[in-house]
Image (tube, rainbow, N blue to C red):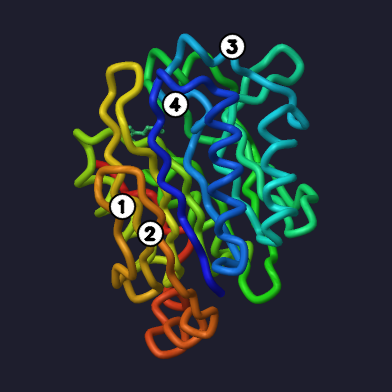
Amino acid sequence: MRASLIQIAVDPDEPVDARRARVGRLVRAESGRADLVVLPELWPMGAFAYESFAAESEPLNGPTHRAMAAAARDAGVWLHAGSFVEAEGGALYNTSLVLSPDGELAASYRKIHRFGFDKGEAVMMAAGEDLVTVDLPHLTLGVGTCYDLRFPELFRGLVDAGAQAFVVPAGWPARRRAHWSLLARARAVENQAYVLACGTAGTHAGVEQAGYSVVVDPWGEVLAEAGPDEEILRVVLDPAKVTTTREQFPALKDRVLGVAAPKRG
Ligand SMILES: NC(=O)CCC(=O)C(=O)O
């Protein structure tokens, strides 16, 4: 399976509609080169552009969904369309979409762990509650978004639900790039799964983005890594590698579940 990660630069001087059109062209250009295309988190306005969240929010079937469905259909690819700000029932969500090659919605995922502690996304958005996996023809994807990468139990839950590869769109800041690269490899090694982690480039809302999108294989080897600027990573994933890694080094079978709490006193 061929996968392309499109690391987009989010530049506040580029209007959201123009970026949507540009991203659509970039996805279409992967036609014939990729079976799966991946975009980053909140690329329409930027993951730290909190002041734009409400103004740029959309219903699930809004302009981002429509533009990306058309691009997926035209390119004939599975498209993890990154995420956008979804407005539903008076709440905002950081929602990602997976579209099939005929442009149909295969899955949507509302980010579970919201970033910002006592500000930003953490207070402006509601949390998702559901783990999401998507069955592609030869590979089951588990999805997470950015800050989720810090929470290994989410990814273990996705493995238990059958995930063989994790797709993690992000808007990760440059000042914590070392965490990003380390956590992407850690999630791959501990779960013996591919990790496709697609971040943004550029600077928006005063936050320099890391870039450095990365694809890690189930043994923890980095298959491809971007630099800090806008870039497309192209890799070939081998679903059999997940099976052989899990068979030849069957650590997942040695999990000890329900370990008791330590005795005190
Ligand atoms: N958009 C995010 O979730 C940012 C996460 C982040 O900066 C971090 O985990 O560090």
Which of the two residues, 22 or 88, is positioned nearer the viewer here? 22
Q: Are marks 1 and 2 in contact (CB under 8 Å)?
A: yes
Nearest-to-viewer mark from 1 and 3: 3
Single out the mark in the foreground, 4 or 1: 4
User: Mark 1 and 3 residues: CB-CB less than 8 Å, in contact?
Assistant: no
Q: Is mark 1 within 8 Å of ligand 1?
A: no
Disc 3 element? loop
* Left or right placement of residue 129 versus residue 244 in this view: right
Residue 76, quarter of the rendered image: bottom right
| x, y percent for residue 175 | 19, 33
Residue beneath disc 2:
187
Whether label 4 touches label 1, CB < 8 Å: no
Q: CA distance from mark 3 to mark 4?
A: 13 Å
* Residue that mark 4 sits on: 46
Q: Residue at x 51, y 31 (%)?
A: 42
**Residue at x 65%, y 50% (from the top left corner):** 132
Q: Judge whether 166 appears above or below 46 on screen.
A: below
Q: Is mark 3 within 8 Å of ligand 1?
A: no
- Per the image, the residue denoted by label 3 is 54
Real-space CA distance between mark 4 and mark 2, rounded to the nearest whole angstrom:
24 Å
Secondary structure at badge 4 equals loop
